[in-house]
Amino acid sequence: MNMIYHMRTHTGEKPYKCEVCEKRFSQQSNLKGHMKTHTGEKPYKCEVCETRFSHKSSLTNHSNLHTGEFHKCDICQKRLMSKNSLVNHLKIHTGEKPYKCDICEWRFTFKSDLKKHSRVHTDEKPYKCKLCHKMFRHKTGLVYHMKSHTGEKPYKCEVCEKRLTSKAGFNIHMKSHTGHSEALYTCDVCEKSFNKKSTLYNHRKTHTDKKPYKCEVCQKCFREKSHVTKHMMIHSGEKPYQCEACDKRFGHKESLTNHMRLHTGEKPYKCDVCEKRFTNLKSLTHHQLSYHKKADPKNYKCNVCERRFNTERGLNKHKQLHTEIKPHKCDVCEEQFSAKYNLICHMKTHEAKKSYKCEVCEKIFNNCNVLWKHMSIHSEEKQYQCHLCAKRFNQNVHLQTHIRTHSGEKPYKCDVCDKRFSQLGNLQSHTKVHTGEKPYKCEVCENRFSSKSCLNNHIKLHTGEKSFKCEVCERTFRQKPHLTNHMRAHTGEKPYKCDLCETRFTRKDGLTSHMRTHTREKPYKCETCEKCFRFRSDFKKHMRTHAGEKHDKCM
């Protein structure tokens, strides 16, 4: 009989089936022991503390707590309650991983770990909450979830007094106060380290191109099924998480958690250098990189603009921005894009319906992401602050662009005239000066423009629209930069200073013109007589002298 039972470990045969949950077993005795989990029967009682158990082996292991009988590991001195636990524990030291996943080839020390892992591929969730019917892959997930219904949070942080439902969550939270955590798990591809095994598992997927989960709306693909679920909220506009203080709604729970800290004043992330505290980890990381010059954890750096990325794939996608390679073409207007996602967003501009509307200014957008970015204009929340001039921004990308005004960094270079720019969009607009391309046409006077923004500003000449108003003298302007420059006439601010003679100017172009008095540069050349001028106004005056003259070279 023992031989028959043993052979089933090789064949996988499990002839005994539980009538309640349909779980199968290779031995009838295992089925009988399992049935006690459904009946709640616990016939074995500890004589010391009267705790009851469903299996005799569980009682035996428990009794060791009272008697002090343990099985000790000779390597790390850890004490275990049973010999079987010691055998399994020793595999951690030997590195033995005899159980392999047939799908992704990951190996595991214990068979139970392989079984749990396989549910990631099958999406099996055998544990169900009786209250809200949510399903879970692992029993521990259900146990922690049940605490969300009871409100039980037995683990309390002694630093900020925050309470947590699980010990694992408590341990992770405690590391947030130091701003760093012990990295135990290292990626064998890029050597990046993580403090959680599950985080390493998810990170390793970034080194592969496998994205089996696809959005049925925009065809975007994802590595995790949960990522598709979150992404679908962009299309549905669903925001299930609501702030109880200001009624603002969010699509993701972590976004609500970060937002709530604005009301509570909680700042759980502390810099280990200057002890300054922050509401979220992203702000802490940016602070440490900007002020303390800590090493950037992103390993892949662009050799053009020095921007860094977590993956080689992300870097390669970014590099296309610096080249003329645009493999994704619109079938309607033939405009080309470097990234597929940009083409998908562009295609929506050809659709008749624009479904995303700003509730503040009623502007309509084709894309929900664009709407969210637009909403930050109306919000007073500006969490990204420049450490040089204290100016604040709604988005990190705007802060990074602003910092270049201090550093003078201009990573984008024109291949024709070698002029450099701080922003890619400015370079793209500039190149049209050389090509003569003017794709945007005014429907009123048929003047053509190289950029859509120039066309929009021009149209205001016809409509007479001046939407930017000075609050001091009530003078109105067509463009916001004109209002900004005008305001300096009231404040007396002159932010642009000449490094040679320390003369200050209200506008940057004023400084640029002034610098020519030091450099003797004369960029404006008359094509008729080849005379050169330092200032454009002088050049224009000179050109009037040639009015009516033939464009022959002056003797």
Image (tube, helix red, strand yellow):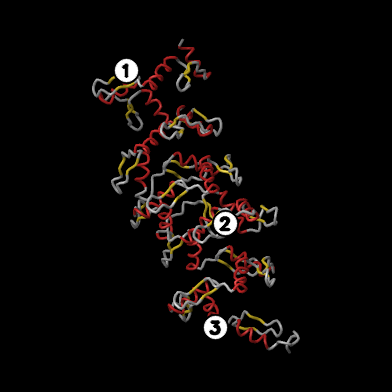
Q: Residue 484's spot in the image, x, y percent?
A: 49, 73
Q: Is residue 472 above or below residue 56?
A: below
> Earlier along the polypeptide chain: callout 3 or callout 2?
2
Q: Please give the residue where the numbered disc 3 appears in the rendered image.
A: 517
Q: Residue at x 48, y 21 (%)?
A: 22
Q: CA distance from mark 3 to mark 2?
A: 47 Å
Nearer to us of marks 2 and 1 is 2
Residue 298, image x, y percentages: 49, 51
Q: Which one is earlier in the sequence, the residue at label 2 or at label 1?
A: 1
Give the percent coordinates (x, y) of residue 194: 44, 44
The secondary element bearing badge 1 is classed as loop
**Contact check, label 3 and label 1, Cβ < 8 Å:** no
Image-based side of 61 in relation to 431, left or right: left
Image quadrant where one finds the C terminus: bottom right
Relative to 441, 278 lies left or right: left
- C-alpha gap between disc 3 and disc 1: 99 Å
Any part of residue 206 in sight: yes
Q: In this image, 336 relative to 2: left or right?
A: right
Q: Which residue is mark 1?
A: 43
* Residue type of the residue flagged with mark 1: Pro
Going by the numbered disc 3, the residue's amino acid type is Thr
Residue at disc 2, secondary structure: strand
The residue at which mark 2 appears reads as: 365
Discs 3/1, front = 1
